[in-house]
Amino acid sequence: MKYLINVLSFLILAPFCFPIQNANAASPGELKTTGVYLNEISVGSGYAWGTLKSYSGNLALYPGFLRIGFNMNSVAGIEGARSQLQLALEPFINSIAEPTADVETGMSIGLRYLHKLSAPLYLFTEASFAPMFLSIKSTEQGAAGFNFLDQGGVGLQYKMTRKTALFTGYRFRHISHAGLSDRSNRGINSSAILFGLSWLY
């Protein structure tokens, strides 16, 4: 438990270790200042599915998340308005529908890279990891408890206005506790389709 608290504390405080500044970004990738600064807040949901060896049915869940994005272009040496690298914090509560009514909850930290395809449309790739609590018991992970959720994905962001955008994407998900708990650790793989709304700053 002490380890989990330390990890969560680090994830919450990590963005504040950089010289974060506010900026009025007109579009993803448009560098307005130096350092790391808040430039996007999103809400999203979707559907995720996979299989569990201990059940005849499939794993099914409905993600719910808040995403907080920080522009890192100047730190990464990215110039111009066509590309953007984001540091993202994403607290989530995912409602498990199958095999039983349960929950996944935690907070991920990761990176998203956006590249302009046309004036309103951006392609992005992303990767993240999250300390999380999984409330179901399974052959793969044993009893309910602490795990990590690793995710990688690709998607599209469409700017509706100067300050709002829609996004959709696919994520591959892997749940494991990395051998940090004294129980089974075969891993649970699943896929997710996500969508949401972003406010740009």
Image: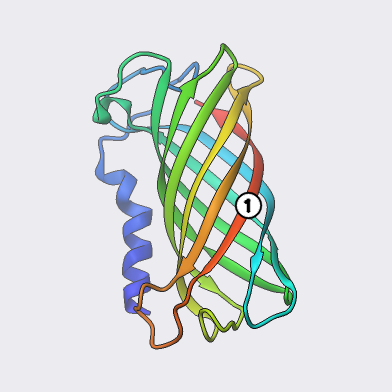
How many marks on residues? 1
Colouring scheme, one of rainbow, by chain, secondary structure, one colour: rainbow
Residue 144 location in percent, x, y? 55, 82
Name which residue type carries label 1.
Ala
Q: Tell whether 122 sits left or right of 74.
A: right
The residue carrying pointer 1 sits among few (fewer than 14), some (14 to 19) or many (20 or more) residues within 10 Å by Cα, namely many
Q: Quadrant of the N terminus?
A: bottom left
Kindly indicate the quadrant of the structure image that contains residue 190: bottom right
Kindly indicate the quadrant of the structure image that contains residue 148: bottom left
Q: Secondary structure at mark 1?
A: strand
Residue 191 higher or lower than 168, as above or below: below
Residue 171 location in percent, x, y? 56, 48
Q: Residue at x 49, y 25 (%)?
A: 201
The residue under label 1 is: 192
Q: Tell whether 15 sits left or right of 125.
A: left
Q: Tell whether 136 sits left or right of 185.
A: right
Kindly indicate the quadrant of the structure image that contains residue 56: bottom right
Residue 126 location in percent, x, y? 45, 41
Q: Residue at x 60, y 83 (%)?
A: 137
Q: Residue at x 40, y 47 (%)?
A: 110
Residue 140 higher or lower than 155, as above or below: below
Q: Residue at x 33, y 78 (%)?
A: 2
Residue 173 location in percent, x, y? 53, 57
